[in-house]
Image: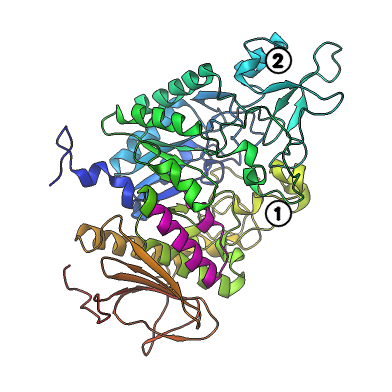
Amino acid sequence: MITTRDGADRAEVDWWRSAVIYEVYPRSFADSTGNGVGDLRGLLERLPYIASLGVQGIWITPFQRSPQVDQGYDISDYCDVDPLFGTLADFDAVLAAAHTFGLRVLVDIVPNHASIQHPLFVRAVAAGPGSPERDMFHFADGVGDAAPNNWVSVFGGPAWNRVAPDSPDDHQWYLHLFSPAQPDWNWRNPAVVDYFDGVLRFWFDRGADGIRIDVAHGLFKAGGMSDAANVPTVIDGLRSNPLVTDQEPVHDVYRRWRLLADEYEPARLLVGEVNLEPERAARNTRSDELHQAFAFAFARLGWDGPDWAAVGTQLELARREHGSAPSWALENHDLVRTVTRFGGGARGSKRARAAMVALLGLPGSVYLYQGQELGLPEARIEEHERADPMWVHSGMGRDGARVPLPWTSGSDEVYGFSTGADVTPWLPTPPGWGAWSVENQESDPQSTLHLLRNAVSARGALLARGRVPADESVTWRHEINGLVVCDRASGLSVAIAMGDQPVPLPAGAMLFASDAVTDATLHPDTAVWLWREADGAPISADRPS
């Protein structure tokens, strides 16, 4: 057994390397107060359900104080709980209960931008041009009556707002790469670096097991604030402007944070939202920086075999160069649900099941988004009911993936999400939403919920018995018949039939499948795990490695 300085099992310390982590979007998870918005007490009451999935941790999206312009990603106090979600005591209760269930807890931190109601931004506006207070953010003089440069916001429109449009003396603008309510911090100011050291210590001291870092690749902007070479007509996140992302100084911040996280026992986990190409994203996970970065190039994929094999190969090459296994995901609160993205209807549902099983067969960690275990489709939200600021500014929205979870199959629009009577949820639930409810799926052994539990259990058994390591080399391939295969060095293969015709089952002993496999035939939209020998001959499914 490898032990740490306090004698802990190394496998326990490195739990994150193979963990399955469940993303909780609290405002849509469970409402304990009857106001139509989920909260921390609702999460506390539903923790037994999350534990029943077999996952190792939860990531909770922002619950800190916020005006809620961007559903919590505009933070006005990083070290308190917004009353909409509860209190710090409620967070402490969630943390304690989660640890009782063996679940780690990751807190979402938003270091790229704050809220216009953050006290430091309020002081900066009041202090005026040239003040040290304004140096905490990005303030700049305009060019005549125009913005300082041609940068655009991820949410659409210019990335600059006038501080005081009617002032005869204050002609400055402030930078907001997201909504105008979210001013960007100036990370070239050491005072900002020190401020966030304090934020991390606050949550780590409280017992949080780690943090998820929002927009981790965007903290630094290119010096000089020059115009972008091109103004995109279709905005692809921060990747639309290389001057606002992937700047070298960000690595110094993550080295600093890694040292801070390693001061704790056990060390705290650092997970980055790094929406870059695989090779660039992996540079953030070198041994002295972040522990993990989401495999965004994979998370955004459709149902396309060549793309899966190509991106999988890119991620493997990046892993070999920089040493950190991918953190796999196909859904989160910003992405269209896989059932819908993969075609919708019965076929989209089958493909989403196969994709979920495939991910759980890969080395590295897996992140699941609430409702993915139920096979929820993207919900259609009418224009007048949308709440996402991205919709307001750009005509694109994320509300369809954020609809409250259906817990029961009742006929009302709440479906067990809220304890209140005659409650209207903050986002409307579609008619018949209860068909996908936890209640319905608990009683159906063929449901997506049971499939997820069984797959997580099978994955855990393989790891516990030492049959597969948490991290290892892989080889991806796409065959002409639509079959995609990921061969792990240990002998486990993941095969997915992504074409329109049945294909022969690859050689090996089948361990797990997303749907029925008959007569050595893999039917379209089905994934399997197989054991193989190095020479291609199958081995027994119960043979120890």
Q: In the picture shown, does residue 518 fall above or below 357?
A: below
Give me the residue at 59% from left, 24% from top. 186
Instruction: Of the two numbered discs 1 and 2 on the same chain, state the one appearing first in sequence.
Output: 2
Q: Which residue is mark 2?
A: 125
Give me the residue at 63% from left, 28% from top. 223
Q: For residue 316: magenta?
A: yes
Three-letter amino acid code at the position of disc 1: Ile
- Tell me if mark 2 has few (under 14), some (14-19) or many (20+) residues whose alpha carbon lies within 10 angstroms of its own: many
Q: Position of residue 537 (x, y in %)?
A: 25, 82
Query: Relative to 457, is 382 on the left or the right?
Result: right
Q: Position of residue 317 (x, y in %)?
A: 41, 57
Which residue occupies the foreground of this view, 223 or 304? 223
In terms of secondary structure, where does tag 2 sit? helix
Q: In the picture shown, does residue 289 fall above or below 161?
A: below
Give me the residue at 49% from left, 46% from top. 281
Q: Position of residue 356 (x, y in %)?
A: 45, 64
Q: Which residue is mark 1?
A: 381
Q: Quadrant of the C terminus?
A: bottom left
Q: Which residues are magenta?
A: 293-319
Q: Residue furthest bottom?
A: 519
* Disc 1/disc 2 C-alpha distance (Å): 37 Å
Query: Relative to 117, is 194 on the left or the right?
Result: left
Q: For residue 274: magenta?
A: no
Q: In the picture shown, does residue 68 fall above or below 472?
A: above
Q: Which SS type dominates the magenta stretch?
A: helix
Which residue occupies the foreground of this view, 128 or 281? 281
